[in-house]
Image (cartoon, rainbow, N blue to C red):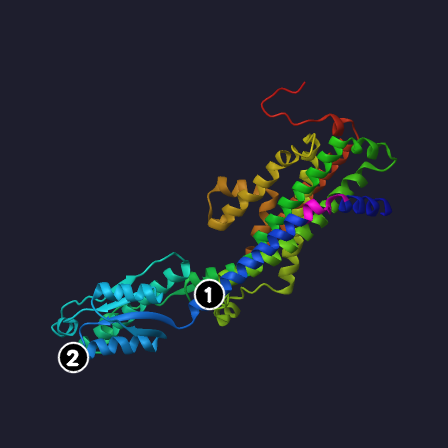
Amino acid sequence: MKVIVNLLGKEVRELLTRQMLVPLVAIALLFAVIGKLVRSEQAKGSGPHQVVIADYDRSALSQRIKWFLESEHLVLTEAQGDREATLKQAKDEGVNWVIVIPKGLEKSIEVMETGEVEIYGVFQGFSITQTMKGVEIKQLITALNNQLAQDHLAKVSPAVKPKNLLLPLRPKQFVVVKDQVVAGTPEMLSEIVMSQTFMIPMVLMLVIIYASQMIAASIGQEKENKTLETLLTVPIDRLSIVLGKMLGAGLFSLIITGVFMLGFSYYMGAVMGEQSIGTNIDSQMVNELGLGITLQGYILVGFALFLAVVCALSLATLLSVFADDAKSAHTAVMPVIFLVMLPFFLTMFFDITTASLPVRILVYAIPFSYPFLVPKAVMFGNYSIVGFGFLYMALFAGIMIFLAARVFATDRILTAKLRLGKKQS
């Protein structure tokens, strides 16, 4: 154990260099700065929004439109002059949106004809916040349309509720999970699942990618500097060397991922606003369906992540044998990254339990698939996948560690090289 601890310290000291830490901290700070800027812009967009309104109708209906917009927290500025003057006024005052109520609008509505309200977007630049505000204004006009339609229907058929005429058929949706029937929509169910499994694939993917690259770079650099030969001459069990390198790369990748995710979480919190994923979920629906991940479930998910990282480190250690220098290290571990990315996207867009047989065989054959499958399997009580995944990942990791130790015990660790497009001499 002391030998492994010493090797672990050696690996961490070699990896924790200024050249490695400065870009990492810079990326985390960049995410934090971007997040702060996004929060600032969202704070501006969430406040009262100015709109220049040109009322050429001067009717009771136009007054109602203006009152409705003001009730929805829009700050209206009366226009001066014709359309060209109104647009110039908006540009000079830095207002992005102009609403024009044409003359004769009320008369058109009274005779059951369609009237038009003109909406102008005055763009002097472009931002998502400005675009979303335009969508909000159109939604307000749609809501006002609904009110006017109900008023017309109330006049034509006073004995019938306007809502019954507008919506004669109302869908009432239910979801069935684990023999439990609950009122809700598939969208709500998807939101519940995503809220509890959103960060797991991100963390796993980052940890595995960083860990694989770190261990490959470490072995490649040692082979390039001829320090690996010196290490192999020391009377140390080769399995201890393999475990020391794996633990060092794993620990360093956890540090990198933690710092990165800290900045990334701040950025995502800003982008998604105050209402993060899952904030609007009906907690009663979660309880009735029993979809909440318990402490036992999180332990299973954590164990799946641990086994996946061990699988990645063991496979990366074996592949790193073919990295003859630090530059070729990243090429050597490309299969690991590919095997992580493939199930990441497949499990995101497909329900593996209902996918075709070839897709299921492909996903189940990749050991890195199970950390993506386990959270959903725990939520839906499908523990057979959980148990099989644990056994498969443990077996895969054991075989890879055994093979890596065997390779380290021979001269192949020093002579094996990666040659793309050329025959090995």
Can see residue 197? Answer: no
Q: Residue 188: x percent and y percent?
A: 44, 64
C-alpha span from label 1 to label 2: 42 Å
Q: Classify residue 230 by image quadrant.
A: top right
Left/right placement of residue 191 relative to residue 255 reads: left
Q: Residue 310: x percent and y percent?
A: 69, 46
Point out the frontmost of discs 1 and 2: 1
Q: Residue 211: x percent and y percent?
A: 67, 45
Which corner quadrant holds the C terminus?
Answer: top right
Q: Which residues are magenta?
A: 14-21
Quick one: label 1 or label 2, which is nearer the N terminus? 1
Q: Residue 30: x percent and y percent?
A: 58, 54
Answer above or below: position of 218 versus 148. above
Q: Residue furthest left?
A: 111
Residue occupying image coordinates x 76% and y 43% = 14
What residue does disc 2 label?
A: 155
| 310 in the magenta segment | no
Left/right placement of residue 298 relative to residue 173 reads: right
